[in-house]
Image (cartoon, rainbow, N blue to C red):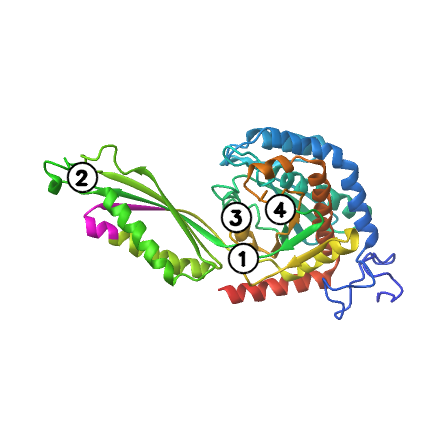
Amino acid sequence: MAQSSLIPKGEPCSSCGRIQPFSAGEKAGLPRKEVFNDKARTTIKSTIETLSSELTEISHYIHSNPELAYKEVRAHAKLMKYLEDKGFTVQSYQSLSTAFRVEYQHGEGGRTFGFNSEYDALPDIGHACGHNLIAVAGLAAFLGLKEAMIKHNIPGKVVLIGTPAEESGGGKIDLINLGAYKDLDACMMVHPFKGPSKTGHVGPSLALQSIKVEYYGKSAHAGVAPWEGINALDAATLAYTSVGVMRQQFKPEVRVHGVITHGGGTAPNVIPQYTQMNWNIRAPTSKELDIVRDKMMNCFEGAAKQTGCKIIVTQDHQLQDLRNDKLLTDEYASTMSESFGINVTSGYDNASNIGGSTDFGIVTYVCPSSHPMYGIPTIPGGLNHTAEFTAVAKGEEAHEETWKAAIGIASVGMRFLGDNKFAEEVTKWWKDDMAKSS
C-alpha cells in the first residue's frame, strides 16, 4: 500500500506501520522544516529527564570510586545491578570480567544500533576524563531509545556495551574479538571535553601504537675492564637520539614520545646491563602510523647492533584512527541545534589539531559510528586529564550537559532504526570511507 503524502515524515503510517522517510533532497544534518519523528524524540527526552536523578547517583558513585583499566569492579557491579533491577538480562564475559552487554529487541527484524559506556579512571587523578559521565550517558541513551521504540512502535534492537580499559589496554578491541560488536549496524558514544558548556565538536583522533623496547647487555666494572661490558644504557641513548634526529622528517601531526622507565644503572662504575624504554607513536591514519613505526624500529634495532645488545620489542594493541560517519554526525549536530540550541562543529579529514587517541577508533572500522564531544564547564587550563577536570566532572552542570548529549545520540539511533533511507545513506557513506582508508 502506498503511503499518503499527508503522513508526517518520521511518523508511522496507521495502516501499514511503516515510517515515512525524508525525500532524497532533504539531507541529514542540514536545517529542515520537519524533525524526524518529533514525538519519539520527546519520549527520549522525557525518559532521560525522569531517570536523571538515578543516573546521577550512579555517576557520583563511579566518580567517588575511581578504578584503573580492567579493574573497574565496583563500577561494573553498580551498572550491572541497575540494569538487572530494571528487568534486563545482562551478558558478562569470563575473559573480560569488567565488561558487559545488554540489549533490547522490539518487534521482529529491523536494524541494530549500539551505545558504549566507559568507566575506567586515571592513576592519581581519578575521573579526569569524565568516564563517570560517559558511563551514564550510554546508559541514558540506551534506556531513552528503548522507551521510544516501545511507545512509537519502532522495530529493531538497541544495545549497550560496557567497555573497560579505554585509558590503557584497549577494552573495545578485546570486545570486538569477543564478538560484542558483530551484529551492530551502527554505534555511537559521547565524551566530555573542556568547556564552555553548550558546545560540541566531532572530529578525528590519531591512530596510536604503544611499544616497549628492552635492551639486554652485560655488566662490567667501568673502571677496571669496561671493554668486557655491553652497555644497555648506550643502546637506549642511541635509540632516543636517533628518534630525536628523525623528527625533522615527521609530518606536523605525527606525535612520538618516549621515556626510559627501567634500568640505566645505579652506580657510575658499573656498566648498565638492562634498560627499558616505553614509546607512544601517533599518526592521523593507521597507514601513516605503520610508516612511522617502521622508521622507529630501524632506530631501535640500529642501536642494538651498534652496541651489541640483545633487543626485545613488545607492541600493545594498536588503536585505529577515529573515522566518524558524516551522516550520523550531521544528524547529531542537527538534533543538538534543534533541541538545545547547541552548535556542534565537525571535521572529518584534518587531524592536525588533535593529539588524543581512543579505542573507539577501531569501532569506526567495524560499523558506521560517531564519537561526539560535548563541553562541560571547565576553568581556563582545566583540560581533560587534569585534576581540575576531575572536579568539574562531578558537578551538576556537567551532568545537565551529559543528558543533552545522551538525548542527541539516542535521537540519532531512533532515526537510524526508523528511517530506511537515512540508514542506507549512513551505511553507504561509511562503506565509501572504508574504501578510501584501505
What amino acid does circle 1 point to?
Asn
Q: In which quarter of the image is residue 421?
A: bottom right
Residue at the spot 15% in from the left edge and 37% down from the top edge:
222
The residue pinned by badge 4 equals 194
The quadrant of the image that shows the N terminus is bottom right
Tell me if label 4 and label 1 are in contact, CB under 8 Å. Answer: no
Question: Residue 105: horizontal and vertical position, in percent?
Answer: 71, 45
Distance in Å between CA atoms under marks 2 and 3: 39 Å
Q: Is residue 199 magenta?
A: no
Can you name the residue that lies furthest to the left here? Answer: 224
The residue pinned by badge 3 equals 359
Confirm whether residue 84 shows in the render.
Answer: no
What amino acid does circle 3 point to?
Asp
Tell me if label 2 and label 3 are in contact, CB under 8 Å. Answer: no
Question: Residue 283: horizontal and vertical position, in percent?
Answer: 46, 57
Name the disc covering residue 304, or none.
none
